[in-house]
Image: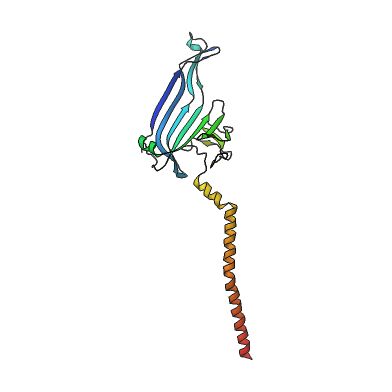
């Protein structure tokens, strides 16, 4: 089994807050995984790169001369950005192959430290993103039906911990089910039933006429 390649990134910064001295702040703690991951329910939907950013640790001191006044805090939120690929098997970790297989679709999910969030499909923002009722920082509820082919979580929390990635678009299987439930599909089914009944009617009439003819012939023979 291939292990994903991870590239760790860290950027240092110094920030001064009122009544606090902040030292040794990491402005961005992030890493990138380069490996193909696919949805279990649709193996044709796959990503090749996943960029993750997490809250940044910072040491904050009220008195820089007294370490006892210092405490570690975390600043910022979470972010996931993933690029989709096609034509590669799950587990592929060849960087050049993944770059060549990218479809151009990219999805970003941001969860800020104040629990607000947003979902971007390409450069379009989904109409709803919420963390209310979700029990982890990596879980969200979303409604992206304002975007072409967008899906929704139906008030359920979708988590980056439970799936390889959150997919806020409709799957091909969902589109197929919707087409079967559509009014056009119902009209087509009724049309087929009507056509079948019309085709079978002449056979019933013909059988009745034959029975009447046989009955009339039998009466003549008796006379």
Vertical order, 196 against 117 (above or below): below
Q: Position of residue 188 (x, y in %)?
A: 57, 58
Q: Quadrant of residue 150?
A: top right
Judged left or right of residue 22, residue 100 is left
Give the color scheme: rainbow, by chain, secondary structure or one colour: rainbow
Task: Classify residue 40 as left or right of residue 142.
Answer: left
**Could you tell me which quadrant the N terminus lies in?**
top left
| Residue lying farthest to the bottom in this orientation | 223
Please determine whether, in this image, residue 223 is positioned above or below residue 147.
Answer: below
Instruction: Give x and y (percent) for residue 220.
Output: 62, 89
Regarding residue 137, the answer to whether it shows in the image is no
Looking at the picture, tell me which residue is in the foreground, 58 or 187: 187
Residue 92 as seen in the image, left or right of residue 218: left
Q: Is residue 163 left or right of residue 203?
A: left
Q: Is residue 50 visible?
A: yes
Question: Would you identify the image quadrant in which residue 214 lies?
Answer: bottom right
Residue drawn at 42 percent across, 28 percent down: 31
**Residue drawn at the location 58% of the way across and 54% of the way down:** 184
Residue at the image position 59 percent from the left and 59 percent from the top = 190
Q: Quadrant of the C terminus?
A: bottom right
Q: Position of residue 153 (x, y in %)?
A: 56, 39
- Foreground pick, 57 / 208: 208
Say which residue appears at 48% left-offset and 22% top-offset: 56
- Percent x, y of residue 60: 50, 15
Picture mark count: 0
Pick whichever, 162 or 33, lies toward us.
Answer: 33
Q: Is residue 92 above or below residue 75?
A: below
């Amino acid at each position: 089994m291939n292990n994903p390649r991870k590239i760790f990134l860290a950027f240092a910064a110094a920030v001064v807050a009122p009544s606090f001295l902040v030292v040794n702040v990491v402005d961005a703690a992030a890493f990138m995984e380069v490996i193909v991951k696919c949805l279990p329910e649709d193996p044709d939907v796959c990503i090749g790169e996943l960029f993750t950013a997490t809250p940044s640790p910072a040491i904050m001191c009220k008195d820089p001369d007294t370490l006892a006044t210092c405490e570690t805090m975390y600043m910022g939120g979470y972010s996931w950005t993933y690029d989709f690929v096609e034509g590669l098997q799950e587990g592929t970790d060849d960087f050049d192959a993944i770059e060549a297989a990218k479809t151009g679709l990219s999805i970003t999910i941001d969860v800020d430290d104040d629990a607000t969030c947003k979902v971007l499909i390409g450069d379009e923002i989904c109409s709803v993103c919420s963390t209310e009722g979700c029990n982890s920082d990596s879980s969200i509820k979303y409604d992206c039906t304002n975007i072409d082919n967008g899906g929704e979580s139906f008030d359920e929390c979708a988590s980056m911990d439970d799936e390889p990635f959150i997919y806020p678009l409709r799957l091909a299987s969902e589109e197929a089910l919707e087409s079967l439930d559509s009014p056009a599909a119902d009209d087509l089914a009724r049309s087929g039933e009507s056509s079948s009944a019309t085709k079978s009617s002449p056979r019933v009439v013909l059988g009745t006429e034959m029975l009447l003819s046989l009955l009339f012939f039998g009466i003549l023979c008796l006379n």
